[in-house]
Structure formats: C-alpha cells, structure tokens
Amino acid sequence: MNKTIELLKERHLFGQCTDEESLDKLMNSEEVTFYVGIDPTFKSLHIGHVLPLIVAKHLCDAGHKVVILLGGGTARIGDPSGKTTSRKMLTYKDIDENTESIIEQIKGFLHIDNKKLQFANNKEWLENLNYIDFLRDIGSHFSVNKMLSFEAYKKRMETGLTFLEFNYQLLQSYDFLMLKERYGVKVQLGGDDQWGNMVAGSDLIRRMGGDGVEAFTIPLLTKSDGQKMGKTEGGALFLDDELCSSYEFFQYWRNVSDADVKNLLLCFTMISIAEIDETIDKDINKAKEILAYNITEFIHGKE
C-alpha cells in the first residue's frame, strides 16, 4: 500500500474511496494533483474545514500537489449536503469578500510551498456559463434516479429540496472536470458528507472519455458520544480570532473528553503515533495540553 494512504488511514483521515487500488497505483507512479473545495459562505473557516487542509499538508509533504478550490460560483447556490434547510442566499459582493478573507486565512496557517499549493475559484468558469449548453453537454450524463439515491438528497426530500440546490451536484462535478483540464487534477478529497457529489464528479469525467481520476473522503469528526466535534456554546469553532479568541480556542481543546484525545492528536497534529500513545499512557492531562498547544499554535501562531 502507498505509504501516504497508509499514514492517512493510521491517523483516521481516510474514509471512502472510489477505487483504492487505482489510487494506490496512481500515487506510487507519479506526482498527483489533488483538490479540496471550500464554499466561501462566511468570512472565516471553522474547525470542520481544517481536516481536509491537514490532509493536503500530508499529501504535499509526500511530494504531491494540492489545489484549494474556492466556490465563488457554487456559493451563489449553496450545497444541500449535510443540511436540513436551504442556505441563506449571499450577495455576490459578500461571496467575493469571503473568498479573499478565507484565502488569506489559509495562507496564514497552512505553510506550504507555492509550487505545491495553488488556489482556484470556480467563479472563473461558472459565472458566465451558458445554461443550455451546460444542460446538453453535462446534464445529459446525470440520472435523476441515481442522484435521489444519495443520502444528501434523501434527507432534504423530507424537508424540501429546491431545484436550485438540485443543480449543485452537477456544478461540483463540472468543477472536477474543469480542474482536471486546467490544473491537471486527478483526485478530489472532501468530507464524508460530500461522497455523493464526489462520486458523481468522477463518473462525469469517465462518461466524457476521461480516465485516471479518483476521489476519497475524510471521515467526519465526531466525539466519542457520537456528537459533532467543533461546536461550542456560541456555535461553530471559528478560526478567526475576532470570532473565537485564541484563548477560547485553546480551552476548547484543553477540555475535550479523555476518550477523544487520541483521535484528535492523530487527526490534528503531526506528532508520531508512538509518541501519542506514550504520552496518553503516561498522563492524559499532559496529552490534552499538548493537543491544545499544538493545534492553537498551528492555527494562531506560536506567540
């Protein structure tokens, strides 16, 4: 097995995959360009966005490349995945400002060489898309029956799914196609809640005569009691110091339950597995302190 895939699995950062054997061969044979997408629906990222970026760091450290795609186009619609209601519609000005803010935020903590890391914005190819041509060229490759079988749409069928949101899967799939053509992207990565969209993107490229593309997910981060990780009394655990101070951020990690410490150290730090096990066995409170200092330094800086 490819050593990077093995590492991601050991650190609980590798979930579902379109074809693991094919991905393994691809990563062993060449420098692969991956992509991770982020919709700029707010001015700051929250902790849920960080895991794909940590995976990006692992991939770049292993000699691969990553394109971070900002959804300046798709944010105009909103992804129904993992949501029970429609997203609030944002103005185009807000989306553009959020995009710039997020790029600066990522550059501030994700220190990866520019040769390994690029930023893209799907507004570039979605903003002036011809809808009739898009339906003919792209929409014809999608089965509505198959789309409705995905969990993201099943959940929304109970509360109401707008036609606007129903288009989202086509647009995300089109993103993968455009990134392959323009940036040489061969693999998409994202959270488990994105699985349906990711499979659809790989399928679209194959249906249009492309090959050699795969996708894999990162398991969604949950606490040992099954609750979603990264929620505070005030809401999401944001990375912006004005929305969540570095002190509050630190305290969140310092006070996690004993049962969650190992998984969080594996996912959010680069500390070796042997060292993690040794620290936890000796002193669980010390392990929490190491976790809190490590992730706070990573996001907010040592000072």
Image (cartoon, rainbow, N blue to C red):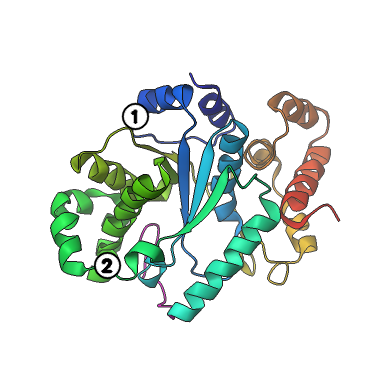
Secondary element under disc 2, as helix, strand or loop, is loop
Q: Which of 21 and 162 is in front in this view?
A: 21
**C-alpha span from label 1 to label 2:** 31 Å
* Observer able to see residue 114: yes
Span shown in magenta:
79-91
- Label 1 sits on residue: 19
* Observer able to see residue 79: no
Asked if labels 2 and 1 touch by Cβ distance under 8 angstroms, the answer is: no
Q: Earlier in the sequence, mark 1 or mark 2?
A: 1
Q: Residue at x 77, y 61 (%)?
A: 246
Q: Which residue is drawn at 67% across and 35% down?
A: 262
Relative to 20, is 256 above or below?
below
Whole-percent x, y for residue 94 in the image: 50, 78
Residue 46 belongs to magenta span: no
| Residue furthest right as drawn | 303
Whole-percent x, y for residue 32 in the image: 47, 34
Q: Residue at x 64, y 67 (%)?
A: 233
Mark 2 is on which residue type?
A: Leu
Secondary element under disc 1, as helix, strand or loop, is loop
Q: In which quarter of the image is residue 57?
A: top right
Main SS category, magenta section: loop
Q: Nearer the viewer, residue 118 or 59?
A: 118
Residue 80 belongs to magenta span: yes
Q: Which of 274 and 158 is in front in this view?
A: 274
Relative to 285, is 145 above or below?
below
Name the quarter where the C terminus is drawn.
Answer: bottom right
Q: Tag 1: Cα neighbours inside 10 Å, few (<14), some, or many (≥20)? A: few
Whole-percent x, y for residue 1 in the image: 48, 18
What number is the disc on residue 129?
2
Whole-percent x, y for residue 301 in the image: 79, 54
Q: Which of 275 and 119 is in front in this view?
A: 119
Q: Quadrant of residue 239?
A: bottom right
